[in-house]
Image (cartoon, helix red, strand yellow):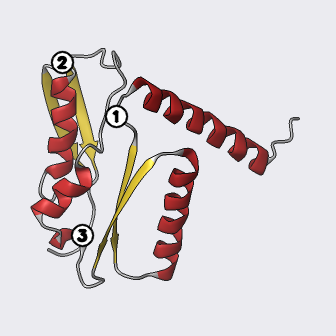
């Protein structure tokens, strides 16, 4: 049986990610970006997002947080806010697309911005046909 030390493993993963990001930066390629839309002032959510911001910063990764009033639900985000959140959020590693037909599965369909953003990147990479499936559960309308 092997004992895994969480902190040691996390430090190794962070070092690997930092090296990969440094390599991407040296190549002049687009850096990875973590985009977060934070709705409201929930202390646990704010703490979680601060942790992600700190983690991104520690490895040289770009991050952006859009903070919205607590009275705004995700369904109420306008098309512009959704598109800002998704701008450059999806990227492909060169030569990663091996298939010509792709199925995108999303958990909710509100404005279609997520599907549009993913589809745009896939089309630019040479995918011929893109389909999407939305699976969601909820109560009321």
Give the residue at mark 2. Answer: 126
Kind of element beneath mark 3 = helix
Above or below for 112 versus 18: below
Q: Which residue is painted at 13% across and 24% down in the image?
A: 129
Q: Which residue is painted at 78% across and 45% down in the image?
A: 8
Q: Which residue is painted at 17% across and 25% down in the image?
A: 124
Q: CA distance from mark 1 to mark 3?
A: 28 Å
Q: CA distance from mark 2 to mark 1?
A: 19 Å
Asked if labels 3 and 1 touch by Cβ distance under 8 angstroms, the answer is no
Kind of element beneath mark 2 = loop
- Residue 108 visible somewhere in the drawing: no
First reached walking from the N terminus: tag 2 or tag 1: 1
- Residue 76 at what x, y percent from top left? 16, 73
User: In front here: 138 or 57?
Assistant: 57
Q: Nearer the viewer, mark 2 or mark 3?
A: 2
First reached walking from the N terminus: tag 2 or tag 3: 3
Above or below for 70 versus 105: below
Residue 74 is labelled as 3
């Amino acid at each position: 049986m092997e004992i895994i030390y969480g902190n040691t493993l996390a430090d190794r993963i962070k070092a690997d990610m930092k090296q990969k990001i440094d390599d991407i930066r040296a190549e002049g390629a687009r850096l990875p970006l973590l985009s977060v839309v934070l709705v409201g002032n929930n202390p646990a959510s704010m703490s979680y997002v601060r942790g992600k911001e700190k983690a991104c910063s520690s490895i040289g990764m770009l991050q952006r947080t859009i903070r919205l009033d607590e009275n705004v639900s995700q369904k109420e985000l306008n098309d512009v806010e959704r598109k800002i959140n998704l701008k450059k959020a999806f990227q492909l590693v060169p030569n990663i697309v091996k298939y010509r037909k792709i199925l995108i599965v999303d958990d909710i369909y509100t404005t279609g911005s997520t599907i549009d953003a993913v589809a745009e990147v896939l089309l630019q990479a040479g995918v011929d046909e893109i389909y999407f499936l939305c699976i969601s559960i909820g109560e009321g309308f």
